Image (spheres, rainbow, N blue to C red):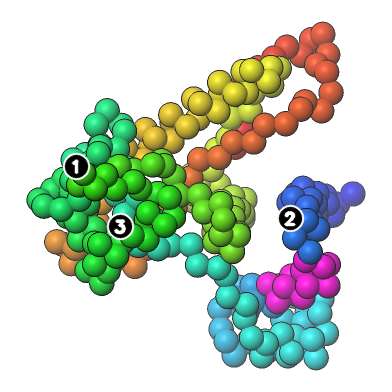
Amino acid sequence: MSPVEADLKAVLGAVGSLLAPIAELCLTRGATIQAVEEMLRQAFVDEAQRICGSDEVATSRISTMTGLTRREVTRLRSAARQESPATRSVATDLLTRWLSAPEYTRRGSPRVIARAGAAPSFEHLASTVTRDVHPRSLLAEMERLHLVEHDEDKDTVRLLVDAFVPRGDQPRMLGYLGDNVGDHLRGAVRNVLGAGDEHFEQALLADELSAESIQRARELITGQWRSLLTDVAPQLEALMAQDREAGRAQDQALRIGLYSWSRPMQAPPSPDNTGKTDGKT
């Protein structure tokens, strides 16, 4: 097998691993292979055009790169794009600020704050996130989403969650899936295609754990995420402020994530293969 064939085999093997969970999602939500195939064809055409770096690139060149016919490329280049579900909202921005701003947290946990008045208050917090939505309207929306609780007797507001997971909003949950997994995958792909250190992308694998240990590990991971949010988010806010003061173009976006996935081990370990934790690139 030539190096080119070996590389192609490895690429298709990696793609096969990615397609299994996509197939599971589609099958359980009624998306047919024809619909997915149409989107895959569209993605191939879009990426070929991006790689060529010009909207005027010849249809024949894209046809050669993708393996699609020229007629199919022409159709796809003129087709309407399907919009992704929106994920970011004023409520999610406020929740993130509440969980990360030092004056709104105590020992890593969100403080109960006054509804109105000077900082720290819900009214002041809302004003740092948006001037377009009145704090009372934002409070009502966050109560509807079961994100906060308003104690009318004390006129205080308490945060009920430490992450925005819109359980009853399937489009938004799917939007998060596409955004988070999509950016993770983009970073990993760019590292493979580039020098290997363009984006931070590491994972830790541990095996020979019990179900009880998995539950404990989930608690550890949640604690790590709280620490990341509390420590890093304020520093990112400071960097944004420095960019504004320096007059630098603020045209870059950064997504930082943490994920975990547990499953039964594929096979029992051999006598010379004891349990371990491995850092994986």
Q: Residue at x 24, y 58 (%)?
A: 126
Please provide percent x and percent y for residue 154: 19, 42
Q: Which span of residues is magenta-colored? A: 31-44
Q: Is residue 19 visible?
A: no
Residue shown at 43%/62% (left/top)?
A: 88
Kindly tell me whether residue 228 is visible in this rendering: yes
In space, the residues marked 1 and 2 are separated at their CA atoms by 45 Å
Image marks 1 and 2: residues in contact by CB distance under 8 Å: no
Mark 1: which secondary structure? Answer: loop
Q: Nearer the viewer, residue 167 or 57?
A: 167
When the figure is inspected, residue 263 is found, relative to residue 22, above or below; the finding is above
Residue at the farthest front position: 153
For the residues labelled 3 and 2, the Cα–Cα distance comes to: 34 Å
- Please give the label number shown on residue 154: 1
Q: Quadrant of residue 55?
A: bottom right
Residue 20 percent location from the top left of the image = 79, 50
Label 3: which residue?
139
**Foreground disc of the pair 1, 3:** 1
Q: Is residue 51 left or right of residue 111?
A: right
Q: CA distance from mark 1 to mark 3?
A: 15 Å
Q: Which residue is mark 2?
A: 25
Nearer to us of marks 3 and 2 is 3
- Helix, strand or loop under label 2: helix
Q: Are marks 1 and 3 in contact (CB under 8 Å)?
A: no
Residue occupying image coordinates x 43% and y 36%: 225
Label 1 amino acid? Lys
